[in-house]
Image (spheres, rainbow, N blue to C red):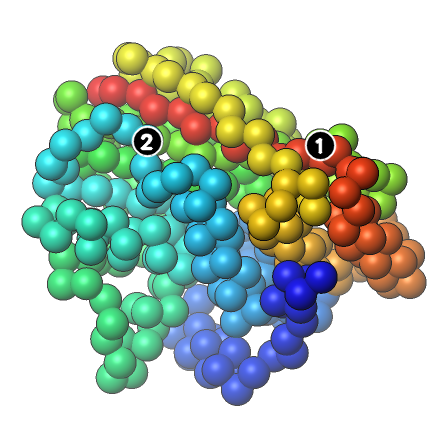
Amino acid sequence: MRWFGWFRRGQSVETGLIEAMALQEGTPVALMGGRMRTMGLPYALPRDMEEINRLDFQHYMLRYALRGLYAAPMQHPGSILDVGTGTGRWAMEMAQMFPHANVVGVDVNPPPADEQAGHGVDVRPANYTFVPGNVLEGLPFDEGQFDFTHLRLLFTAIPGDRWPRAVSELARVTRPGGWAESVETTGLHDGGPNVSLMMTWIAQMSSRRQVDLMNGSRVADFMRAAGLRNVAASVVSVRTGAWGERLGMMVATDFVGVCKGYAGLLVGAGLTTQEQFDRTLEGMRKEFESRRGRCYTPFYVVIGQK
């Protein structure tokens, strides 16, 4: 199916420019497993143009699956924070949706739009700002600074024992009466043998970095422990693969991109060989294309009020 061609791209000149900028500006990135990755973090996925394309694709997929950008019952937020902003796509769309709000994205690395702005191209909304920071080290903001704080798909980036502090930081910078929101997953479930094997490898690699993928389902507990009230959680289970129609194939395509991002690390760690990985990836594509599959991906949407 045509979806699986989405990430079949080699590194481009633009990729090389982004990597060169990152190195020039002192961002700790290095070539590992054939892809550029940020050093010193539990997060294992790459930082290159192929991954930027995947993250943007994932953003549109999630917006479609969750039928919007947010779930919290807010009306006219004056300040919004996006923790682990990635490409900045969510934050910039929120800035356009709420033109009178001050929207801040925070991450270890600047999004492409911010890197390009430093070289003469600025497509950022006027009310959007990027601030470098790492939630694992504490957010660089005063207490109660934001009406709405947001965190999405950091389940592969936060070690198990660091989740309580990360959520506490989210709560700390939320103003009284404001809302915090998280969207996480635990990966794919009930897939065929190739999907299951790929998930096993990713879980094993994550465990070596002290990351437990199941923490994606526990954020509501972390919010309650952080003192947030009116905590509400819902699960959106997305049929993954052809049996889920268009959205199902979008989720499958995104997961194929994730697997390709892990490939070099999985092989380098001795969890598989390149030949076995390639066979498993191809078998996984066939499983996704079969309408007999019953694979699904749960997305845990949790909100809590300060």
Name above or below for residue 274 compared with residue 121: above
Name above or below for residue 85 compared with residue 218: below
Left or right of residue 13, residue 167 in this image: left
Left or right of residue 222, residue 212 in this image: right
Quarter where residue 277 is shown: bottom right
Q: Which residue is mark 2?
A: 71
Name above or below for residue 199 compared with residue 60: above
Q: Is residue 269 visible?
A: no
Q: Which residue is mark 1?
A: 189
Left or right of residue 28, residue 127 in this image: left
Looking at numbered disc 2 in the image, what kind of residue is underneath it?
Ala
Q: At 14% from the left edge and 37% from the top edge, which residue is drawn?
A: 77
Q: Position of residue 98 (x, y in %)?
A: 16, 48
Numbered marks: total: 2
- Using a 10 Å C-alpha cutoff, classify the residue at mark 1 as few (fewer than 14 neighbours), some (14 to 19) or many (20 or more): some
Q: Residue furthest bottom?
A: 13
Q: Position of residue 120 (x, y in %)?
A: 25, 84
Q: At 52% from the left edge and 71% from the top edge, which residue is drawn?
A: 49
Q: Position of residue 95 (x, y in %)?
A: 20, 53
Q: At 19% from the left edge and 63% from the top edge, which residue is drawn?
A: 125
Q: At 27% from the left edge and 57% from the top edge, which residue is drawn?
A: 92
Q: Please tell me which residue lies in front, 48 or 208.
A: 48
Q: Is residue 212 visible?
A: yes
Name above or below for residue 37 compared with residue 106: below
Give the Cα distance between marks 2 and 1.
Answer: 24 Å
